[in-house]
Amino acid sequence: MAKEKTIFFCTNCGYESAKWLGKCPSCNNWNTFTEEKFTRAKGSQSSWKSTSKDREQVQVLSEITSEDKPRISTTNLELDRVLGGGLVAGGITLIAGEPGIGKSTLLLQIALQMPCKVLYVSGEESAHQIKMRADRMQAKLNPECLILSETNVDHIADQINDTPPELLIIDSIQTLNSPALESAAGSVSQVRQCTAELIKVAKSRHLPVFLVGHITKDGSIAGPKVLEHMVDTVLQFEGDQHLSYRMLRTTKNRFGSTSELGIYEMRSDGLHEVLNPSEILITQREGDLSGVAIGATMEGNRPLLVELQALVSTATYGTPQRTPTGFDNRRLNMLLAVLEKRCGFRFGSSDVFLNVAGGLRVEDPAMDLSACVSMVSSLEDIPVSDRIVFAAEVGLGGELRAVQRMEQRIGEAEKLGFEQIIVSKFGLKGTDLSRFKIKVHTFANLNEVFSLLFG
């Protein structure tokens, strides 16, 4: 057995050092070094038994054809949307999220639904436990879905060589270990080594691979940061475990947009796609209620109508609170300052709570106007009609600024039965309003909007 030695790894970039360092000389981050007992097995090489036909040959760039190869559909419309149209042959996709959020459930559903040979490798569950979960989903079983409960990459390699799959799912990358190293599974060196070997087989065989990744208590993906650089696509599962809705976001995608969003509903028989999320993001209520406004936002190419709820009350505990949920705190403070300075509303002695209904987090500046309307509505205790939608950015001068994709926002509001939409007068250039039945109001500043709504 080879001699054991201690090596310090930077969890952010993977830099190796023989001693602990406070600051990484490679990425300049502080306190990122972790200690590992490291042993390379004698005579060990890569775990994958590659052959000469697996090796890529040198090619002249001008002779490489650039025709688009068709993407592989996962049979899941929301996942295909987030991936940019489907899987790419040879692509590595990392799905990360909190425990119990639905990562394994989603991938098992994909394995059971895809009409091709799928190898599902689990290092966390036995084959019997996976079968119990599949039975609970009540899904039609894929006769070519192969289950392997294994953590050794050599044994996974043997299975791929014996029965080459068309899709490989690894649940999870932190449970795998390579015999080439004798460090513990989940360590920085093991995660990096196993990922590198999986990438090698994926690229040589043009095999799409899904990896499940754990996250740390601060929400970042466990293991070295270099893991996110090595893969082609990184998807983040978000949502409260106490709520039924889950959001799947793209944080990195070499083959598509990084601004797409997929929405799922968790039920007893698995995750179900939400194809019209605007209906679930708008609360069904009886009677008029102050402090509520509907905003039109965009997530990638998808228009969404989102309900913003504001509560403005007298501050009785000293310093007034500014507490947004799903909305940027600094932007909230900026909008409050604009309302005080440009419109004369006094929020200085009031607590302000702003909530995005449905557990969604919005970053689109087009939600500024709906946020301002909801806060003024709560302050004055005057309800706003639930048949009106707002879509405009608010500038520091109180002016309404144009936002992109206005036709899609108007079309979504009309489709859901809204009667009016208020937008910036500068955001309709080239827009044909005659094809919309919804009434479109255009204004230049906040005061004009408040005159219409509150008199």
Image (cartoon, rainbow, N blue to C red):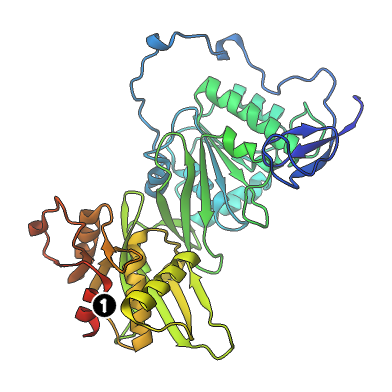
Residue extending farthest left: 434
Q: Locate the N terminus by quadrant.
A: top right
Task: Name the one closer to the observer, 26 or 353.
Answer: 26
- The quarter of the picture where residue 274 lies is bottom left
State left or right for residue 290 relative to residue 347: left
Specify few, some or many for label 1: CA neighbours under 10 Å numbering under 14, 14-19, or 20 or more: some
Whether residue 160 is visible to the viewer of this picture, yes or no, is: yes
Task: Name the one closer to the observer, 142 or 363.
Answer: 363
State left or right for residue 147 relative to residue 73: right
Residue lying at 81% horizontally and 40% vertically, measured from the top left: 21
* Rendered location of residue 299, percent (x, y): 37, 54
Q: Is residue 56 above or below residue 176?
A: above
Tag count: 1
Whether residue 283 is visible to the viewer of this picture, yes or no, is: no
Where disc 1 sits, the SS reads: loop
State left or right for residue 419 relative to residue 286: left
Amino acid found under the numbered disc labelled 1: Asp
Task: Name the one closer to the observer, 333 or 202.
Answer: 333
Residue lying at 85% horizontally and 36% vertically, measured from the top left: 19
* Rendered location of residue 137, percent (x, y): 50, 55
- The quarter of the picture where residue 277 lies is bottom left
Q: Is residue 402 above or below residue 67?
A: below
* Rendered location of residue 36, percent (x, y): 83, 39
Residue lying at 63% horizontally and 47% vertically, measured from the top left: 221
- The quarter of the picture where residue 101 lies is bottom right
Dot 1 corresponds to which residue?
Answer: 386
* Rendered location of residue 160, percent (x, y): 60, 26
Q: Is residue 173 above or below residue 386?
A: above
Q: Locate the C terminus by quadrant.
A: bottom left
